[in-house]
Image: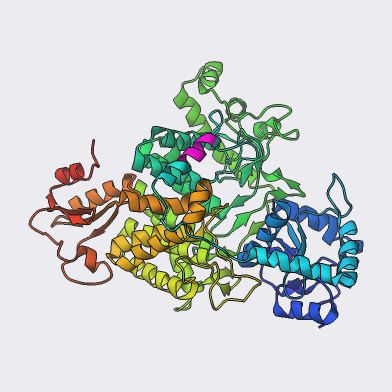
Amino acid sequence: MQERCSTEFNWLIKSKSPYLLQHARNPVNWLEWSPEAFERAKTENKPVFVSIGYSTCHWCHVMEDESFEDPEVAALLNESFIPVKVDREERPDIDAIYMDACMKLKGQGGWPLNAFLTPDQKPFYIGTYFPKEGKYGRPGMMDVLPQIREIYQNEPERVKEIGDRLTEALEVKFESSGDGVPATVLHQGFGQLARLFDGVHGGFGGAPKFPSPHQLLYLLRYFNWHGEPAAFDMADRTLDAMASGGVYDQFGSGFARYSVDEYWLVPHFEKMLYDQAMLMMAYTEAWQLSGDPRYAGIVSDLAEFVKREMTHPEGGFYSAIDADSEGAEGTYYLWTDEEVHAVLEEREAEIVCAVYDIMPGGNFEGKSIPNMVGLNLDDVTAEFGLTEEEVENILSESLPKLLEARGERVYPHLDDKILTSWNGLMIAALAKAGAAFGDGDLIEMAERAELFLEEHLWNGHQLFARWRDGEPKFHAYLDDYAYLIWGLIELHQATGGEKYIGQAVRLAELLEERFADGAGGFYFTDKEGEKLLVREKDVLDGALPSGNGVAAVQLWRLGKLTADERWSRRSESIINEFSGEATQYPNGTLTLLTARMAFESDGREIVVSGSSGPDRGELLASLRSEFLPFDVWAESSEEGSGLLDALTVGKADRSSPLSVFICENQVCHSPVKGLGQAEEALGLKE
């Protein structure tokens, strides 16, 4: 192997990962993760330095500038180590192992994640961000690299002992409680959220504050199931506060990754596709419960933002937008009052500045993050002698002008790779929102993205995890299958298209075939995928909902739709396998607990029949606009035609314009005839 790919580039130039390509000009002779890299480490008796990050990671950029662009650091890495770069979004399997090791060793983690490994992939030293020189009690690369080299060369037994011990700690060990998950744990999950809830500013805990939409989805379902008003109130107040904060892009829509303060004011400006998807879902469901027009507007604006800035021409969705542009964080999104006045007429500018807190001196490093934290619109209307409607009209006319002016700025880096898992979430969110609001454009966005995945990330017998620049790559992971099943079920519920259920069943069968652990849950990686140090299996929610938790929920739904007991049994077996973790960490396993709640609520199977298209359509629209998280529905068929037969055959009744068959608690009732009676029986009209 040559020492460098060329005089200008290292070996990462051959990659299609946006993150790896960002490092292709580093003087560090980076390699991609590969068997060849570890074979070279073994041959040359060198440790492997693995640096893990992603292309929109601010501190990854900082470490690159400080260390990986530095000739001294590069010389040490090239001489004494085998340097390997990993895109965590393409290889979450690798990231999960070494993040777990970092958490066990340091008690905390984050990105960039930097690990020193033996040639057999065992970690013996690990950390996150290292500056070039040590500062603020944090060791620097110029301190760490010589010490690691010395220890590796002179104390091999110590290195081996640490590596063996850490590897043993990483081995997956799950103990079922033996009795499943009692319903009391569902209440404990709510209780833990209630204790963490910030009653002043919304959200959970203190700074930094993450949106954590899976927590909000749990609270909305808990409210639906248990009727606890505080559950809805916590979700509602959090969603309202986030929509007012700087964490929400007030001019262009889209949510930032998190807020650095407790007020939702100052964001970490990067925008991730999965946050847009999960929050779109949360705002849609909050609207279904409350009818709040503000939430409907947020959903519409989110969809428009994703369509405008995060959608491939063929329909798939890009991964993320960086926080940084022009060498600084947030530059693209910040405003001065002078900049606003340069775009708008004087009175318009004054009103916009008053509403969005854009004042001389700013609220962030001399400029302003547009926000409505603490806004009293009555004060604005009184100050300018306008009605609330007049102010809103001025804002609706002004914001497009400001957005257009912002578009002239240097745009942040766009990570344009397309990930199956995150696309699955966005498909689910758009399908749910489109169905709820009766918006065919949103459903079409979801269907185009699903078709993109079919054409580019599916070869007929397995999924791939990532597509970019014409290349599908990497065996798909648990999240890819589970999240896409979610999206397909939502598409069926939104459109009635049976093909989506067929695809969901096929993916569920592959999930069982390729990922089952033999005990009840699923491994994170495909059995045909690369063999790593350990085969991860997890149930804890993080920035994304747990793959095992999502699988448990969606297989339960699939079982109800197909009347196929194997899927509901499979869901129950996942819950039982992780019952120990759920009982011990309710707040960390809320997605799994949602599946347990589904069994507790049971829900209804609803078959819609009748001779009148308009009545059937109106009832389906009502079902889709209501918050019915544990119900499923399908239209009847005259004769067997597919996977919904077990649910629908025998429930075709053309004797009236509308007949509805409702089954619950393993009992089917006599059909209800007529739109009014059907809506009353289903609780759709008060």
Q: Is residue 487 visible?
A: no
Quadrant in which the N terminus appears: bottom right
Residue in the image at 61% along x and 37% along y? 246
Q: Is residue 158 above or below residue 328?
A: below
Q: Residue at x 61, y 62 (%)?
A: 416
- Quarter occupied by residue 512: bottom left
In the image, what residue occupies the spot 71% across and 73% down? 33
The x, y position of residue 504, in whole percent, is: 38, 67
Which of 656/233 is in front? 233
Query: Main structural element of the magenta stretch: helix, strand or loop?
Result: helix
* 519, above or below 311, in the image: below
State the image coordinates of residue 604 (x, y, percent, origin top left): 26, 52
Magenta region: which residues? 190-195
Front residue of 400 and 643: 643
At horizontal 19% and vertical 55% (from top left) the residue drawn is 667
Quadrant of the snapshot with the C terminus: top left
**Side of 47 where 408 appears, left or right:** left
Specify whether residue 191 is painted magenta.
yes
Across and down, in percent, residue 350 comes to: 61, 25
Residues 104 and 310: in front is 104
**Can the viewer see residue 288?**
yes
Whether residue 354 is in magenta: the answer is: no
Drawn side of residue 618 relative to residue 360, left or right: left
User: Residue 425: x and y, percent?
Assistant: 48, 57
